[in-house]
Image (spheres, grey):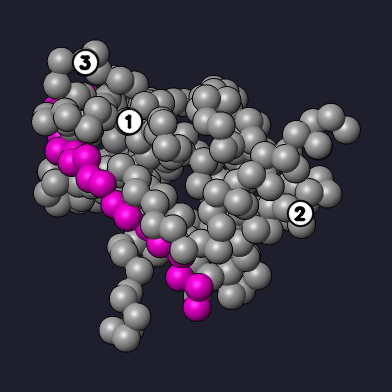
């Protein structure tokens, strides 16, 4: 009961903070500097950033059910507004004081042989910081999310973990490539690093090391390749579009110019 009262108080305060969604909020996000799709020796890696601006593109990760609110729906409705289709959303990887680095990744095998990736590794590399490995366990991911929410006065700690758990079957986490990829098939999932690059960092990239790109007929590795994706930190503005009832990237239109 006490937990429910705390939830209601937090959500009521959030409703006051966001008001009628007239405020513009600024977040830092990641963007690929060059081509988000790289092909080498008929092996393709696609890397797509998923920031708060792309929330509505991924219902399998961020759409939420009213049942998660346990009776506090009347409060949450003003914080997580329904869109025109009656759907509600929650992006748990970004807060005002902390964030994570999230990508959708696809590794496509267009060769004629099986790719055995047991030695491949993926890291977020940033200036002088130690290379960072992605999260590979969903319980570890939920712990990281809860930790971020615990340090954010406008979040209800544990709610993001509940959203992830409700969509658990969709969360394929990739932190290495210890897999076999058949000819004509692909391996895809989420690449989630537990922190975000510093705003002042200049050299930031996601690097895929020792990706098998060629083998002989017996399956022995003939070639390993490195794939690198330079990343840019970018500040984006979001405003609430009252007509479509969704957050949009950019600044709200000036009256008389719509």
SS of the residue under disc 2: helix
Spatial CA distance of label 1 from label 3 is: 12 Å
Residue 156 lies, in percent from the top left, at: 64, 35
Compare marks 3 and 2 and give the one earlier in the sequence.
2
Viewer can see residue 65: no
Mark 3 lies on residue: 129
Quadrant where the C terminus sits is bottom left
Q: CA distance from mark 3 to mark 2?
A: 42 Å
Which residues are drawn in magenta? 218-243
Q: Residue at x 65, y 58 (%)?
A: 78
First in residue order: circle 2 vs circle 1 = 2
Q: Is residue 227 magenta?
A: yes
Q: Nearer the viewer, residue 199 or 212?
A: 199
What residue did someone put label 2 on?
73
Q: Badge 1 is on which residue?
A: 196
Left or right, 96 with respect to 47, comes to right
Q: Nearer the viewer, residue 127 or 152?
A: 152
Residue 78 seen in render: yes
Mark 1 or 3, nearer chain start? 3
The residue lying at 46 percent from left, 55 percent from top is 55
Q: Let me know if residue 115 is in the magenta part.
A: no
């Amino acid at each position: 009961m006490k937990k429910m009262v705390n939830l209601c108080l937090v959500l009521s305060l959030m409703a006051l903070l966001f008001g009628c969604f007239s405020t513009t909020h600024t977040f830092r996000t990641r963007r690929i500097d060059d081509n988000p799709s790289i092909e080498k020796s008929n092996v393709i890696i696609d890397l797509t950033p998923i920031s708060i601006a792309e929330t509505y593109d991924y219902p399998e990760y961020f759409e939420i059910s009213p049942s998660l609110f346990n009776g506090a729906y009347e409060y949450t409705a003003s914080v997580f507004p329904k869109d025109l289709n009656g759907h509600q959303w929650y992006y748990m990887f970004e807060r005002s004081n902390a964030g994570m680095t999230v990508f959708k990744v696809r590794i496509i095998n267009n060769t004629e042989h099986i790719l055995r990736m047991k030695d491949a590794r993926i890291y977020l590399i940033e200036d002088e910081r130690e290379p960072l490995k992605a999260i590979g366990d969903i319980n570890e991911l939920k712990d990281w999310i809860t930790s971020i929410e615990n340090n954010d006065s406008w979040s209800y700690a544990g709610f993001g973990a509940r959203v992830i758990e409700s969509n658990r079957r969709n969360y394929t986490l990739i932190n290495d490539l210890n897999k076999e990829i058949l000819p004509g098939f692909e391996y895809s999932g989420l690449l989630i690093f537990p922190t975000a690059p510093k705003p002042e960092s200049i050299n930031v990239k996601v690097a895929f090391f020792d990706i098998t790109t060629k083998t002989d007929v017996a399956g022995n590795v003939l070639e390993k390749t490195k794939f690198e994706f330079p990343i840019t930190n970018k500040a984006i503005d979001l405003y609430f579009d009252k007509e479509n009832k969704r957050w949009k990237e950019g600044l709200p239109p000036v009256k008389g110019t719509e």
